[in-house]
Amino acid sequence: MSTESGLQRAGLDAPLELGLPKDNRILGIWIFLAGECAFFASLIGGYLGLHMNVAHGPTGAQLFDLPLTTIATLILLSSSLTVVLGVAAMQRRDVRGMQIWLWLTALLGLFFLEFQGYEFYTFYNHGLTIQTSAFGSAFFTLTGFHGLHVAFGVFWILLLLFQSMRLGINEERTTKVFIMSLYWHFVDVVWVVIFTLVYLAGKVGS
Amino acid sequence: MHEEPFLAPTQPAEQRAQRTLYLAIGALSLALTLAAVFIVVAGIARPLALPLLIALAVVQVLMQAFLFMHLRGSRHLYTYFFLGGVMLAILMASCLMVLIQQWA
């Protein structure tokens, strides 16, 4: 594929050079995500090593509310679909469609955070805090950091939405939206792993 | 030279096919989640439940990575970074889990 045909396919008017800067940004986010894999691996490994150490506090099997967490998981997975449809709309130069899908994604992300907040509050009321036991520390650290990633993702989406509403869409901002979508999918992927290894395995092991 | 992932299909038929694919993958991902929950709630395949759950999660992760994150059709270098990160993650998590269980 030549550079020229690539530009035509992107629907760009000016013949800009598709070179290293754009490639480097996408390569950069993949390198960042590889590092994030290691970050979450350390938290998951720590949780799996410590989850049996409950001291005198409640266990995961006693606390985990599977229907609630399943709904939260379905919401987060749906947000992966909405963000990819947003990117597809952007690729068609359908700015309005992209904005609608991204608003929906941010909304789903906020719903997920609300579920997580409610879960933390419930666990607190049942006597599990970050100081109760090694299980509590590992659980809140792992899911809390994931929640922070979701919160950052929502902030990023909203920032790009406001940019697109004020300034429209150009090649620079389409790349930013694409990079944000990679981050958002990664956060979803991490949740799939957490949901399986923490919540579902926690119930199976009980 | 591989195509950049953010360059869209230009033909309406291609665009429709792309949307259909995304919707199918999204629906399949939700269905796999519900299947995993069903395995746990119904208590079926008890000795094999954990490997089965992990297998379902791996399928979901690969679908997300290769189709939603556009690794399929992107530069192989991105795939190497992603899979390298995943391998490192598995190694780190396994080592930490064993070490902590040994000493906790």
Image (cartoon, rainbow, N blue to C red):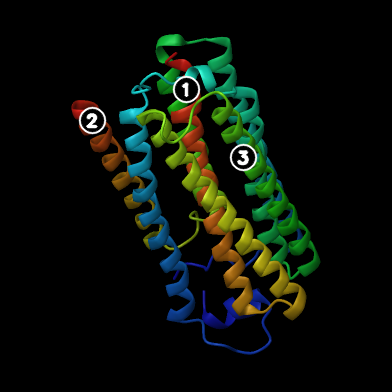
Around disc 2, counting alpha carbons within 10 Å, would you say few (fewer than 14), some (14 to 19), or many (20 or more)? some
Q: Is residue A141 left or right of residue A1?
A: left
Circle 2: residue type = Val
Circle 3: residue type = Gly
CA–CA distance in space, label 1 to label 3: 17 Å
Which residue matches tag 3?
Answer: A117
Q: Nearer the viewer, mark 1 or mark 2?
A: 1
Q: What kind of element bears circle 3? A: helix
Circle 1: residue type = Gly
Query: Which residue appears at 66% of the width and 54% of the height?
Result: A83
Which residue matches tag 2?
Answer: B98
Around disc 1, counting alpha carbons within 10 Å, would you say few (fewer than 14), some (14 to 19), or many (20 or more)? many
Classify the position of the N terminus of chain B by image quarter.
Answer: bottom left
Residue A93: image location, x then y, percent: 74, 71
The answer to whether residue B31 shows anywhere in this view is: no
Cβ atoms at labels 1 and 2 below 8 Å apart: no
